[in-house]
Image (cartoon, rainbow, N blue to C red):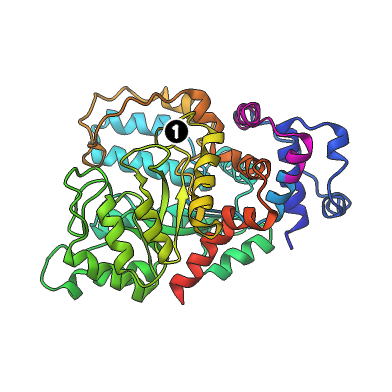
Amino acid sequence: MSNPINRRSFLGTSLAATGLSAAAAASLSAAEKTASQTGKTQKPIQNEKILHARKVALDILKPSQKELEHGLELHADSLVFDSYGFAPRAAIDGDRLAEAINDHASTAELQDLREDMSMTRCVTDPAEQREFKEAFDAAGVTCIFQNAGEEGQDPMRLIKRLARFTYTTDMLADFVPKAVTPADIEQAQKEGRHCLYLTGNGVPLTQQWETTTDEMKYMRIFFQLGIRMMHMTYNRRNMLGDGCAEPANAGLSDFGREVVREMNKLGIIPDVAHSGWQTSLETAQVSEKPMVASHTTCASLHHHIRSKPDNVIKAIVETNGLVGICCIPRYLGGSGDISRLIDHIDYVVKKFGVDHVAIGTDVAYTSRNSALESKKVPRAPRSRTPWRSLWPPDSFRTTPEMSTSVSWTNWPLFTVGLVQRGYSDEDIQKIIGGNMLRVCRESLA
């Protein structure tokens, strides 16, 4: 059972944002009506950014009123689990960042300061906290598999985001606690709260290369700190294997095979979203527990280095794992919008089964205050392309409409889109949360 007050809050937000008529609003279920009798009401959403995103997506989907109502109510009643994403991001404190620049802070210091503010000002700034909660409620997401590690293998590099999201979930535990087991996620849904389940963007290694056991010792520590999924590689080659941007596509190293075995032993899900196709394939061949490509697309629909071909998806499925379809237009190809997102989900379902697909958005809601605060910051000189971003150029052109249609707060409309495609309620609930929850359970078994 969903929490009725939280359900009413979500439905009220969604109905206001979609412009349903009074007659449609009157058709809400008994749970919603019961909630309204408690006197605990919430004002309709006033956030123009969220409203605009809903309108753009609805103009593309064009659902019937019946499809829209059913999709929104199903979303409100479901456990929704983003298989890889980001909690809403706060605006920076422009004055503070400008002061740091004027005090000649290093590039690394400024990057850390900017990131820390975007991830933790939802705790310390009342306006940012309101918007953080508003965006989370509008999305109707129970749990995010939260990116909580900066790309790399250095434990000190990886621990920074882990600390920031531990702090956020500690300080906002009544609204968005940290989940450490699948049961915690289910409990959050029952209580009408949201939660974060944490993933690292790399495997923490000592990088001393004495023995494989010594090299992997931080993996257990990060698991004990709450990390439940790790990237094998991030775009480029590392000691585990080749990333998706490596033209050699050399696959998994011997050490990488040992890492997969250690992940299985600890209960950490191997994630090959940013790995090369051969590395992804060989990770699946080694793993004895479910593994994932948490935020990817189907190469058969659009060839991109961040997509996965059928043989790789098949290998992932054979571990009883899944692929999470992301909301990046460049990787989706075609129309690059919310309809194309559903196309990729359809492809996986029809070819590999409904039990092996999820939605891993890989996008974040950013505070409406961001533009104003950023104007306070002196323009930085153009920097070199980061190592992780060195990959082949492509000719795809992303439009604002594409990106807006797959905004993170449009999660309820992803469910509406699945309703339009004729999926049963049971299958939709698997896609929007149940499948990822199952993988989490099996990884810890």
In the drawing, does residue 390 fall left or right of residue 406? Answer: left
Give the residues drawn in magenta, as a range.
50-70
Give the residue pinned by disc 1. Answer: 329
Residue 130 belongs to magenta span: no
Residue 16 is situated, as x and y percent measured from the top left of the image, at 75, 34
Asked if one can make out residue 203 in the rendered structure from this viewpoint, the answer is no
Q: Position of residue 301 (x, y in %)?
A: 43, 39
Q: Residues within 10 Å of mark 1 (few under 14, many from 20)?
A: many
Magenta region, mostly helix, strand or loop? Answer: helix
- Tag 1: amino acid: Pro
Nearer-the-camera pick, 27 or 99: 27
- Secondary structure at badge 1 equals helix
Query: Which residue is more in the foreground, 122 or 427?
Result: 427
Of 313 and 60, the residue lying toward us: 313
The quarter of the image holding the N terminus is bottom right
What count of labels does the image hold? 1
Please tell me whether residue 53 belongs to the stretch shown in magenta: yes
Q: Kindly give the residue lying farthest to the front in the view shown.
A: 351
Report the side of 317 relative to 129 (left or right): left
Q: Residue at x 29, y 30 (%)?
A: 101
Residue 322 x, y percent position in the rendering: 46, 58
Instruction: Using the image, determine if residue 18 lies above or below residue 432.
Output: above
Using residue 353 as the reference point, say whether residue 11 is left or right of it.
Answer: right
Residue at screen point 75% across, 36% down: 44
Locate residue 199, reporting x and y percent: 40, 58
